[in-house]
Image (cartoon, coloured by chain):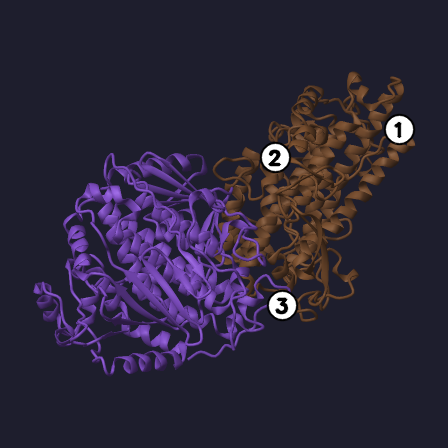
Amino acid sequence: MISSERIPNNVDLHCNKRLQRALEHWQPRYLDWWHEMGPQGFQHYHQVYLRTAISVDADGWCHYDYVKMPEYGWGIFLANPVQDRTIGFGDFFGTRVWQEVPGEFRQPLKRLIVLQGDTEPASVEQQRLLGKSCPSLYDLRNLFQVNVEEGRHLWAMVYLLHTYFGRDGRDEAEEMLDRSSGDADKPRMLEAFNSPIDNWLDFFMFAMFTDRDGKSQLMSLSESALDPLSRTTRFMLTEEAHHLFVGESGISRILQRTCELMKSHGAGLSGDVRRVGGIDLPMIQRHLNHWFSESVDLHGSEVSSNAATYFGNGLKGRAREDTFDEHRALHQSYQVTAFDAGGFDTRTVPLRNAMNEVLRDWYIGDCEAGIARWNRILEKNGVGERLFAPSRRFNRKIGIYAPYHFDPQGQPLTAEQWAAHRHEWLPTDDDRAYLASLMASPVWEPGKFANWIAPPLRGINRQPIDFEYVRTDN
Amino acid sequence: MEQSIVAPPIRCETHPDRYRHWRLSCDGQVATLTMDVTEDAGLRDDYRLKLNSYDLAVDIELADAVERLRFEHPEVRVVIVRSGKDRVFCAGANIFMLAGSSHGHKVNFCKFTNETRNGIEDASRHSGLRFLAAVNGICAGGGYELALACDEIFLVDDGAASVSLPEAPLLGVLPGTGGLTRVVDKRRVRRDLADVFSTLVEGVRGKRAVQWRLVDRAVARSRFDETVQARARDLAAASDRPDGATGIVLGPLGIRYGADGADGALVSLRVERQARVAHLTVAGPSGVQPQTADAIHAAGDQFWALRAFRELDAMLLHLRLNEPLIGTVVVRTAGDGDAVRAVDATLASLAGDWLVREILHFMKRTLKRLDLTAKSFIALVEPGSCFAGCLFELALASDRIYMLDDETRPTTVALSPLNFGPLPMSNGLTRLDTRFLGEPQLVADLAEEREPFDPLSAMDAGLVTFAPDEIDWDDEVRLAIEARAAMSPDALTGLEANLRFAGPETIETKIFGRLTAWQNWIFQRPNAVGERGALRAFGNASGRAEFDYTRT
């Protein structure tokens, strides 16, 4: 039975017949999906020290306890309403936000929610085998925390579909469980979510860069005129922050360990680190290049009619819309650096059509700040090499740069030049084989860490680092 | 004021070697037409053809490919229409191209694309060439209409691929290539379901698309190609295309276009700009004509009947696309009427041959193109003309026929078997049947008449409009042309379209009739193209559409 006790919520589930009916059907299918497609090998006997949101109050969303993952309290939470909130951008600027979906925008809103929702279970599926190569119980717990919260984010989107989109919404919610990452017949909607993530370097990079795209998207949706969407995504952002922390700190700890290995073994160049079981900086840079460029792609085309429509209609805004001076964006323009056979060229496009690019600018700035923090670790350890974000033109599959090749500095290349050098810039089969061998055996012992990663500075929820973050039942 | 054509002239002749947007490959009985649109190779450079969206340049290649499949590849029985892009079949006509086009260009674009799709159905119905749409992803608007023109539609069932007609909800216009008509009339989708479908921007996916009859099968991605291929083989088995035949080559026409007209080997066009009149002259056959199927195959694209109608087709398209200010076309023929009738007799007696069949259908399609050209046509039967048989169809297709009655310089018109069946209009009737809708017995009587008609008997038989004598001729003709050229072109277009297509409705007449009446009206309305109209507002930074909500 569907009940408020089993499903923590602040949406009055106990008196919402429509939502109860919809969830009665959907929840068992969700649990089946979690069993089948969720973390493999940790479903029945393992208890994980997880944070569960039980309310949206300051401490309500960080309630920690051991829990078996299938029994996790996936809940439905909307951030507290903002009193008298008005629409912050677009053609309806200044008018009251919507508590119901206007019929006129039913389709694009549904599309935005389905696209966002589809990525949530997709990442759980991509990461389902990682538990078998974990570098520590601490990391294993962080992986699972990310996984259950991505699951909850799916719930959040399904709540919106069930509550505001009628039968169509219920069908879409079903189909989110039908599609699965990498499935030949029913793949996930976005291509970046269809390849497995089978090593922890990829996982941390994914959490750093791809989850940061999630943050971009959630920030822009949190500006939406549809108030329930805004409130849902605002609460999701609090959880997303932890995912970014897992990614950024994961790479920080790898960098720390790499520096230690370089120093302790007297290897001047990070390339030698491999001989002592570490991950060298060029390999880290290649993975950074891959995930950064893939996540840059997720922001869409530079010039987009959909983006203009979404903005104009108040469906999807800019990250931190309140920091902009002008919220209609009607008469402004944006300079896009275009490229074709004739070389670079600056094109002026109406600002609304460039909203993807505006969001991408914010995203790249946010990434660069994180990379700067990584470089401080190298600096502190006296290592001269530095990581950097490749040019936004590098390795693109979507948008105006997609037909051409560019190096990480953004300089154009011929197809031959690209083929000759791409192995220097993107992860290679060798890299993958090396990482697979490095991570072949998991580390289960509390307080122990794999050779290629440093321990964290502190534990979760003020627990010690050697706390048993994941334990078996008996 | 002289309005010059700013854009370079549009030419509809092309060849697979020069395609930028399609790939045609033949493998035995199954050909594959792969749509892989080059974004920056449209007719103009103010839009990009993203997501396999198309403009006229793309459709010209499609039309060319379909013709070549009919003439050059008689061994092909099934054509798989697919996309070269991952998860995108075709996003339809390019919206930015439409938004930036003159009304005339939009109408010409829609008309040509409709003729191309009708050509696909014509090839299926009459030439045993079946079309199978393999829809692998986004299939919206004109993309779905292209699929609708095929015999069967297979859709990938991956939870994402859908078919849709989003024109009304998204753009405030209608599907322009027969989508609505074909949904209810060809695929026989229930009208209420069609109503839901045509107002859903996101369209319909998978099993529901099959249940609603919008597609024939929804197939899992992993089995899609194999299922399509298997179905293609089944369809091939049922085709009546010839075994072991060799196609002919459709060579370049070599028409010379100049400032005041165009010259082909058999058809010429002279333009009088000041008067807004063009003079179109078709030459009849001369010299020895092939009389056997083998001889026709050997003559190939130089055979008079094919050559003359291919040139005529090119001239009609040139008039439509590049001569917008020419409102009146004076149609003449030059040659020997008996020679035309002799060719007609050969064609009629060899109609079972695959190439003769194709030639006859090509003649039919070209004449339909004339019927559907929004210019006034006036046929002049003068001394030395050869309005006989298939060329008399040019006169019958014209809005009026003037025949000179001069004893010293005799003129005749004559009929052949081709006037009584093989060259029907889009209403399914012959031009004679349509002309004499109220007097069907007249047509039966005419079928018995072997002799040419002189002016008096042609008037008696109702085959010509007027037969002025030599004293009146010049003035009568001049006045008719000048009066015509002075009238409102909009009124004339509507008037002619009303009068040309008497008789029953077919899917084709519905498509063209509704296109002219509804789409062209909607395309002019502020709700679509006004400052705040939906078509203008789409994807535009200037804000959302605002409608005048008045209805009648």
The answer to whether tags 3 and 1 share a subunit is: no
Label 1 is placed on what type of residue? Val
Q: Residue at x 37, y 55 (%)?
A: B116
Point out the image quarter for the C terminus of chain A: top right
Label 3 is placed on what type of residue? Gly
| Frontmost residue, B550 versus B142 | B142
Q: What distance separates the C-alpha of mark 2 from that of mark 3?
A: 39 Å
Label 2 is placed on what type of residue? Gln
x and y percent of residue A34 in the render? 57, 37
Residue A290 sits above or below residue B369 on the image = above
Residue A99, disc:
none
SS for dot 3: loop
Residue B340 sits above or below residue A199 on the image = below
Which one of the lettered chains is coloured brown?
A
The residue pinned by badge 3 equals B543
- Give the colour in which the image draws chain B: purple
The residue pinned by badge 2 equals A126
SS for dot 2: helix
Residue A386 sits above or below residue B447 on the image = above
x and y percent of residue B78 in the render? 32, 41
Q: Is residue A66 visible?
A: no
Which chain is mark 2 on?
A
Q: Which of the 4 quarters of the picture holds residue A192? A: top right
